[in-house]
Image (tube, rainbow, N blue to C red):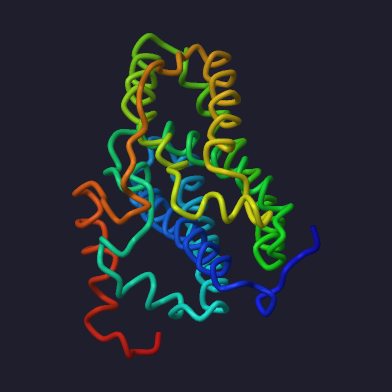
Amino acid sequence: MSQQTIEQLKPQVKTAIVDLLYRLADDHLILGHRNSEWTGLGPILEADIAFSSMAQDKMGHALAFYRLLQQLGEPDPDTNAFLRSGDQYRCCSLVCLERGDWAQSVVRHFLFDEATRIRFEALEQSRYEPLAQVARKLRGELKYHTMHGQMNLDKLGDATEESHQRMQDALDRLFPHAMGVFEPTEWDETLAAEGIQPREAELCKTWRSQVADMCAESGLTMPDDVGPIYGGRAGKHPEDLKKLLDDMQKVYRLDPDSEW
């Protein structure tokens, strides 16, 4: 299949791409905000700096996707980030959950970035060239994130009895939410048929297989027989998101017309 530009998109395909981009942008923005909550609080200075850096990257990735949305006629990035209500966000529940302890943040970081790596690898081949170009660029930055996640999984998975238990508890708690990253939508078939992105179920299958192997190598057991937590792609979120948006949007909403 040949590459497609904005001008060549059929209306239904354009709508499907817009939906996909909102999911990607909102996931990265909200997780970036969550990771930033460790700034000044990390267990050691190196971890503090790393999480702050990755938070900044995540927000930069969100900006790249919001800019693609703007090219398709959607609002500008600031409006999308700071003036939408919670039910207008399309992020998965995994990124919405409160910061929690260090184990929760490390496990969430690992699960999400492995899912993102698999998705970006697929999007590099997308027929929608603007999205393929962004995926190629961002996957280079994502490499550091996945290395950091795998390193911490290995380091804490079987370091001590306590660290193992904290990590296993976090994995058990977060895994159903992580499966929600791949929540199917009404646009799955359109995106797959047009060569924009594989079906969510296909991406999830690859992710589960690879994550299971990585967890086993770290002394952790991936939960079996658990169902995914869906709803985020339809605007149904944990209560945790409301508090996050209240904090994140407060200053901007005081005077949206200000120039910074």
Which quadrant of the view contains residue 172? Answer: top left
Q: Which image quarter holds the N terminus? A: bottom right
Q: Residue at x 25, y 79 (%)?
A: 253
Q: Indicate whether 40 appears above or below 161.
A: below
As drawn, which residue projects farthest toward the top? 161
For the residue pair 123 and 7, the one nearer the viewer reads as 7
Closer to the camera in the image, 142 or 25: 25
Query: Where residue 237 sits in the image (x, y, percent)?
Result: 26, 50
Q: Would residue 122 appear left or right of 238 to someone viewing this image?
A: right
In this rendering, the answer to whether 156 lies above or below 96 is above
Q: Relative to residue 48, is residue 255 depicted above or below?
A: below
Along the line of sight, the residue nearer the viewer: 64 or 36: 64
Name the residue at 72% across, 65% down. 129
> Residue at (65%, 43%) from the top-left corner?
143
Which image quarter holds the C terminus? bottom left
Q: Position of residue 185 (x, y in %)?
A: 44, 50
Decide: is 113 above or below 12.
Answer: above
Residue 82 in the figure: left or right of residue 158? left
Provide residue 214's location: percent of width, then percent of height: 58, 21
Q: Say whether residue 39 is left or right of residue 133.
A: left
Tally of marks: 0
**Residue 169 percent location from the top left of the image:** 32, 20
